[in-house]
């Protein structure tokens, strides 16, 4: 999206796509730890892996900014409901149902950017987390 005269000054072009499941897990923990003390210990999550997989599946098309806004809205909702510092997976799933991710809302623009980035280097490495989706054969 940069003008051509500026692009010529860069040696490499990087493409930053939506985060994979491992990156989304880290993004969620980063923002959840701001509002909820139980998420401040990265080694001990209050949610099971299955709950995390459900949450990550529902937020698969979301940008990091949309995840941050969803966590903030869930924290505000918890505060107004009289349970500050407490959040459940269902609270975040409810927030997710209240907005349309930008990938769906602006699909044409984002797909055009993806198509132009065919030769760009990815900015993130492959997902090595325990939430990585294993590769599947298309035809067996």
Image (cartoon, helix red, strand yellow):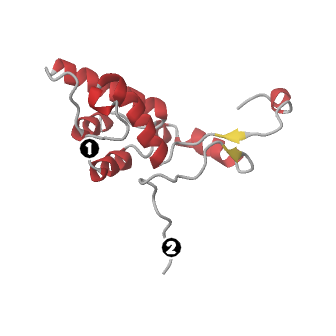
Q: Position of residue 89 (x, y in %)?
A: 25, 40
Disc 2 target residue: 137
Q: Which mark is residue 108?
A: none
The Cα atoms of the two marked residues, 1 and 2, are separated by 31 Å
Mark 1 surroundings: few (<14), some (14-19) or many (≥20) residues within 10 A: few
Number of marks in the rendered image: 2
Q: Which residue lies furthest to the left in this view?
A: 82
Q: Position of residue 15 (x, y in %)?
A: 66, 41
Secondary element type, mark 2: loop
Horizontal side of 86 relative to 122 (left or right) equals: left
Secondary element type, mark 1: loop
Front residue of 118/56: it is: 56
Q: Which residue lies furthest to the bottom in this view?
A: 140
Can residue 70 be seen here? The reply is: no
Compared to residue 52, the image places residue 70 above or below, namely above
Q: Position of residue 9 (x, y in %)?
A: 85, 30
Q: Where is residue 96 in the image (x, y as percent from the top left)?
A: 32, 37
Q: Earlier in the sequence, mark 1 or mark 2?
A: 1
Horizontal side of 125 relative to 87 (left or right) equals: right
Front residue of 42/91: it is: 42
Mark 2 surroundings: few (<14), some (14-19) or many (≥20) residues within 10 A: few
Please state which of the two labelled residues, at mark 1 or mark 2, is closer to the viewer.
1
Evaluate if marks 1 and 2 touch, with contact meaning CB atoms under 8 Å apart: no
Disc 1 target residue: 47
Residue at position x 23%, y 35% in the image: 91
Compared to residue 54, the image places residue 109 above or below, namely above
Can residue 110 be seen here? The reply is: yes
Horizontal side of 103 relative to 5 (left or right) equals: left
Residue at position x 23%, y 32% in the image: 87
Residue at position x 50%, y 73% in the image: 137
């Amino acid at each position: 999206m940069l003008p051509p005269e500026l692009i010529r000054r860069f040696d490499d072009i990087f493409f930053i796509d939506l985060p994979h499941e491992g990156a989304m897990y880290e993004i969620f923990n980063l923002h959840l730890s701001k509002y909820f003390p139980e998420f401040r210990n990265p080694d001990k999550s209050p949610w099971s892996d299955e709950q995390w997989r459900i949450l990550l599946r529902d937020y698969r098309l979301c940008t990091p900014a949309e995840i941050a806004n969803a966590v903030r809205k869930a924290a505000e909702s918890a505060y107004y409901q009289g349970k500050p510092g407490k959040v459940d997976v269902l609270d975040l799933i409810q927030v997710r149902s209240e907005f349309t991710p930008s990938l769906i809302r602006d699909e044409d623009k984002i797909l055009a950017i993806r198509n132009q980035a065919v030769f760009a280097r990815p900015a993130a490495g492959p997902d090595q987390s325990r939430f990585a989706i294993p590769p599947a054969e298309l035809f067996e």
